[in-house]
Amino acid sequence: MILNLDFNSDIPIYTQIREQIIKSIASGDLKIHESLPSVRNMAEEIGVNLHTVNKSYNILKDEGYINIDRRKGAVVNALPLSKNDSNINKIESMLDLLVAESYLLGLSREDFLDYSKKLFDKYEVKNHE
């Protein structure tokens, strides 16, 4: 698994790992029931502390993206994830900030919706189980 981390970014490494794994699942690069590298292997591969990878995996597990099994390791969960109130509220909160930032940067509603559609389509066209 190839991750492109920016060690000079203000975004913590564990967050970058989490986000790239989510994008890999959504794009179909990581398949349902596919195993992720072990924490140790991932840490060695990308040159970070194993606790950093472990933190990313535990967050992904808590969010329902992966399951962690002692024998199989970290495995991608079936999709789609539960569309519960907590997840909807989380998405709404993230979108609220993104819309506010876009507005302050001068992006029109139409442009925002066009960009959103293009990005959504990038994931929607992938076939998941």
Image: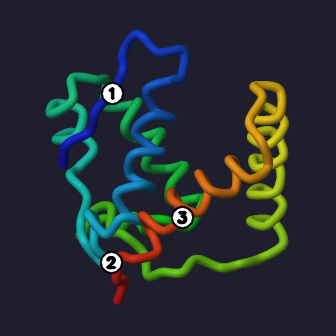
Q: Residue at x 53, y 23 (%)?
A: 11
Picture disc at residue 5: 1
Percent of width and height locating residue 36: 25, 58
Placement of 118 over or under 14, stated as above or below: below
Q: CA distance from mark 3 to mark 2?
A: 19 Å
Query: Which is nearer the N-term, disc 1 or disc 2?
Result: 1
Q: Residues within 10 Å of mark 2 (few under 14, many from 20)?
A: some
The amino acid type of the residue labelled 1 equals Leu
Left or right of residue 47, residue 85 in this image: right
Q: Residue at x 33, y 27 (%)?
A: 5
Percent of width and height locating residue 116: 62, 56
Q: CA distance from mark 3 to mark 1?
A: 23 Å
The amino acid type of the residue labelled 3 equals Phe
Q: Residues within 10 Å of mark 3 (few under 14, many from 20)?
A: few
Q: Which residue is mark 3?
A: 120
Placement of 119 over or under 84, stated as above or below: above
Q: Which residue is mark 2?
A: 32
Q: Residue at x 31, y 24 (%)?
A: 49
